[in-house]
Amino acid sequence: MSLPLPDPALDPRGYQPGGVSAPVRQWRVAGWARANLFNSWLNAALTLFALWLIWAVCWPVIRFLLVDAVWDGASRTDCLADRVGREVGACWPFVGAKLGQFLYGFYPAAERWRVDLTAALGLGLLIPLMIPRLPYKTANAVLFFGVYPVAGFVLLVGGMFGLPYVETRQWGGLLVTLVIAVTGIVGSLPLGILLALGRRSEMPAMRAVSIVFIEVWRGVPLITVLFFATYMLPLFLPAGWAVDPLLRVMIGVLLFAAAYMAEVVRGGLQAIPRAQYEAAQALGLGYWRTMGLVILPQALKLVIPGIVNNFIGLFKDTTLVLIVAIFDLLGQLRAAFSDPNWATPTTVFTGFAFAGIVYFVFCFGMSRYALWMERRLSPAGRR
Amino acid sequence: MSESRAAAAIRTTRNAVAVELIGVHKWFGEFHALDGVDLRVMRGERVVVCGPSGSGKSTMIRCINGLEMHQRGRVIVDGVELTNNLKRIDEVRRDVGMVFQSLNLFPHLTVLENCTLAPIWVRHMPRREAEALAMQYLERVHIPEQARKYPGQLSGGQQQRVAIARALCMNPKIMLFDEPTSALDPEMVKEVLDTMVELALDGMTMIVVTHEMGFARQVADRVVFMDYGRIVEAAPPEEFFSRPRHERTRLFLSQILH
């Protein structure tokens, strides 16, 4: 049955297991383009049209952001076309002048190091936590999820250890955006998991409570939640029960996000076969260890895309706090537009371009990290 | 083998019932899955359970470790009666190993981690000790070299042998097998059965739901035939196969022994 293999010593062409040797790389690119992009008149026309479209969209953006942009200046006059003597794109000095406001809001300038320190601590703990190779994950997680929130609270709010008190009314800009988004993101996942488990529980009371919670919070718009938390909740609370407005909003966003998260997690739980539960039960693992060691690691891995989707949505939804007079990054931006010192025809576009870039960097970063994590966790990536 | 059977007999007489089912009933909605099952399995005894599909054999052994709750009658495992008390069910499960028909190793853990999970988290064994124990059992099922692989990288037969090792790592007093070879490709059945035979020869108390009659002949102390949720006949293998007393048993045997 066996076919005679060509003997390399006898074969004049010099037998190679891979067959024909690979062509030179540049030929491959040109060949690929000819085979795929220009293999018919219609395809050639579509290719050219697409190239034109890319050019038509990208070039004005590049011109506005980089080529025609003004990079130095001290006031609006430096960004006016008649002053510069040419067409003017983005007015970056505006962003430079207002950067402090965009980042910190009205946080007192002398105390802004506290915000910087909080951010540095957060990054210093988060980055090693996100790199799987690094050791001491448990200690790191305890520090980030347990100690850091307390440290961050003390640093940002102050009023103890000799730090002057800074009320949250003065907070703003990216600081507020990140405070709301990070608490929402970090808090909504565990709460969402508990709600999802509750909804699948065999205890009727547990199930009822979870379903009511999820459906009520999912059933109302976030704006309603924010309005309720800011303007109506104080009316219901007994006198003297003042809860900080920012904290109220943070809790509102957190619970809202948790309801959505619960449904994503539930989808993952439903995808795990019954046999997995039974195998874990038969080993005597009990409910919580079955969930924590066997079911959730598999279920959460399946729904990483959905979880990240929620995180990104939540991050961008934080801009809604503007309507309850909390000035996040976008709020500070709009406030800065009304400054007559920087009123130019391109100020508004510059500001939104800046905000867009900032939001994109955060969201794209989350998305890429999640994608990488997903690949790492897939069985093929683990060999 | 006769030696081991004699040894089993000694153990049996010396003491103790391992599993006892008394008048056990179970319904799935209208379907009467178990209709008054009485069974007593002594320590060290090997019982093979067979019968047509839907006869209640799986349901019966699933009642022994509380995966199904019986609705009437009593189930007593190693002296502990199974009730709705969840703590007590977990207590029983720790001492009862189970191997399923479906290949249900935990796919996100390596073979070794599959084996050490329960000893570490349920028995609170130090990791190193648990790993040593796991390696010992993986050697016993002849696949120590696969310890660092993930279940998806193993063949069905290898997975099922890991499942046996995983159950053994909890040092169970009783092993339950629910059609462990039915989901396997034919060429892998033997390696799993061989492992089970070795286990039986070591004196493990085993209740095995299977249609592998060769296995039953080789190691069973008793073969139990079930139909319509009842135990129709229970006898030592030589008697069971050569002189079945009931018509239904005869019919069943003629269908599976070609």
Image (cartoon, rainbow, N blue to C red):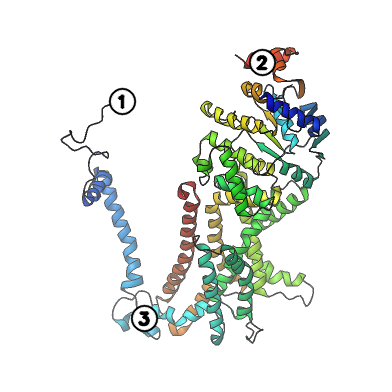
Residues at marks 2 and 3 on the same chain: no
Name the residue at 33% across, 68% down: A62
Vertical order, A278 against A245 (above or below): above
Q: Residue at x 40, y 81 (%)?
A: A93
The image shows residue B249, relative to residue A357, as above or below, that is above
Q: Position of residue A311 (x, y in %)?
A: 55, 60
Q: CA distance from mark 3 to mark 1?
A: 80 Å
Which is more toward the observer, B221 or B34?
B221
Q: Secondary structure at mark 2?
A: helix
| Residue at numbered disc 3 | A79
Circle 2 residues within 10 Å: few <14, some 14–19, many ≥20: some
The type of residue carrying mark 2 is Leu
Q: Secondary structure at mark 3?
A: helix
Nearest to the observer: residue A58 or residue A8: A8
State the residue position of label 2.
B253
Task: Indicate the quadrant where residue A85 lies.
Answer: bottom left
Chain letter of disc 3?
A
